[in-house]
Image: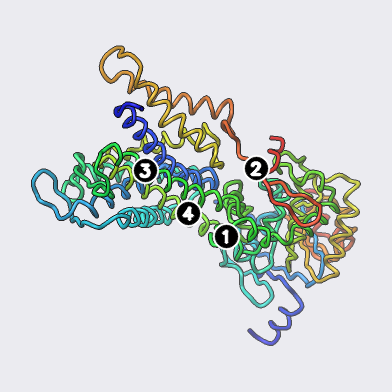
Amino acid sequence: MTAAAQLAAADFVLRTEDVHRSFGGLAAVKGVSLAIKRSSVTGIIGPNGAGKTTLLNIIAGADRADAGHVYLEELEITPLPPHRIARLGVIRTFQRAGVFPTLSTMENVLLGVVERRDETVTVALQGPRAWRRAESGVMRAWELLEQFGLASLANDRAGTLSGGQKRLLELARAVLMEPKVMLLDEPMAGVSPSLVPALLEYLRTMSAGGMTVVMIEHDLAVVEDVCDSVVFMARGEVMATGTVSEVLRSPSVQAVAHGF
Amino acid sequence: MIPEAWQFYIATLIVLYAVTLIAAFGLNLQYGVTGILNFGYAVPIGVGGYTAALLTLGPPQGRFQTYWFGLELPFPLPWLAAAAMGALVSLALGFIVAGRLRGDYQAIVLLAVSVIATRLVQVQKEIVNGGAGLANVPQPLRDFVDSSIAYQWLYVGLAVAVAGGTWFVVHRISRAPLGRALRAVRDSPEVAAALGKDVARLQLLVMAIGGAAGGLSGAMTAQYLTGWNPESWLLLVTFTYFTGIILGGAGNALGVAVGIALIPIGFREATRFLPAIGYPGLIEALQWVVIGLLALLVLWLRPAGIVPERVVAYEPTGRARWHIGRRGRS
């Protein structure tokens, strides 16, 4: 790695270089290069079909790029499977809330905090005492569920929660995992408006504490409120980057907005 | 005093229930807990039966049955070897499907493997005597007991002990943090992977553990019945197990125990006492029709089974208390 590249890696926690992805004849992502600053909140906006979720899937390892590279700090993560990328500290949420419907809300959260070394046959055979030791994060999970308004639902199956509650659960779990990078796919969709300001404040605090957030969001008020920078995507390409007002004033964005 | 014939009958029922339960616990770990629709589960059962037979029959005499090789290993080595072979074969099946194929495609591939395995054994006479199977398989610890009725009860003790041990292992795995990760894989492999769970590794792990249970069950059945052939591990066997697990309550050891008591054991035994109607074999054929209909009805009317899987409840006071809690609304 060159000195310049090392410098870039130090400033930017996540980078994509010329990422391409096609489905049959449809080019979903066309040569996307992004550099996400450490400890920032970046919004990805754009019309439906712009390639936003495909890009997120590629970064998280859930989908493979046809060409291009994705770097987490100095490490290229393009070829890694999703569980390896998650273990490196990149945690994502899903467009349709990614919860485990037959597990309780608390179990869903615990899946994020129990160490991998405790999910073994040896610990399983040791019995309840060892399991409780492995679940030492449960009290912190209670606090977080309280903050997210989910404590009263802790022992209910996640499948019985409303759409908004599932999103909150997914977000609470991601926060609890204290990732380096959090990839959020429309995190505020369906969430009760009264909870949104508190959640955004939570994201700001987490970001100030060193976590980097990349979020796909359709609500421009939310983007304006929380994002330090914005990436506008359309037809698989990055059309503009900058602050929300800069991006919205950009001629290329105006052209897309007016159907050109 | 219970008449000896009845003692035989009761002991046989208990042994068959216990050995079926051992396999069902293994399959439940794969299907009920982890969500692997393993239609090839009969394969490790079959391999376990043949392993125990080959390791106890002694060298081939070349008269009425032909087989690849034979040893005369003492108990419990044949059972342990059968469990190991069941795990290995199951692991091999796992490598074909785990992490590569989604649930329904996994099921189709495993079903195809099961059919191919049965056909191969049926046509290949040199390895384990083809379709006729192996007979005169020695029983374990037979010389320790004089009377055959006492031996029946000895086998009951062995079978119940092994079933209890299998329950212990499978129950602990499914209730521990590992079990939670397995159930996460069942509910959504994509989300589990996004949380750092190695889905393929977890699937392979339960393929191996479940396969060991299947192999053990096959070995115990073969040595109890003193014979083993392709009929003993047909695809239909897998479907009966699935029906029992679904009826009782997948993902839950108690549900499996209830379901297995009702379907492979209870239902089939009950129909044995029906008066003969129609042409010979009609009732037996109808059994399968009724088992299939029952599976459909349960999936339709009560998909969680008689004893549904419960969630673990946590309490917010003091240290986290771990116990089985309310079922949650569903």
Mark 4 closeness class: few <14, some 14–19, many ≥20 residues within 10 Å? many
The residue tagged 4 is B98
Q: Is residue B57 visible?
A: yes
> Residue sitting at 76 percent across and 60 percent down?
A176
Kind of residue sitting beneath label 3: Ala
Which callout, 2 or 1, points at the residue further toward the start of the chain?
A: 2
**Residue A126 marker:** 1
Q: In the drawing, what numbered circle is on residue B42?
A: 3
Where is residue B63 shown, x and y percent of the image?
8, 46
SS under mark 3: helix
Position of residue A64 in the picture relative to residue A55 (left or right): left
* Other-residue count near label 2 (Cα within 10 Å), few / some / many at <14 / 14–19 / ≥20: many
Q: CA distance from mark 2 to mark 4?
A: 22 Å
Residue toward you, A140 or A172:
A140
Residue at left offset 50%, top offset 47%: B167
Note whether residue A27 is visible.
no
Q: Is residue B18 left or right of residue B61?
A: right
Q: Name the amino acid, label 1.
A: Gln
How far is disc 3 from disc 2 in space, using C-alphas?
28 Å
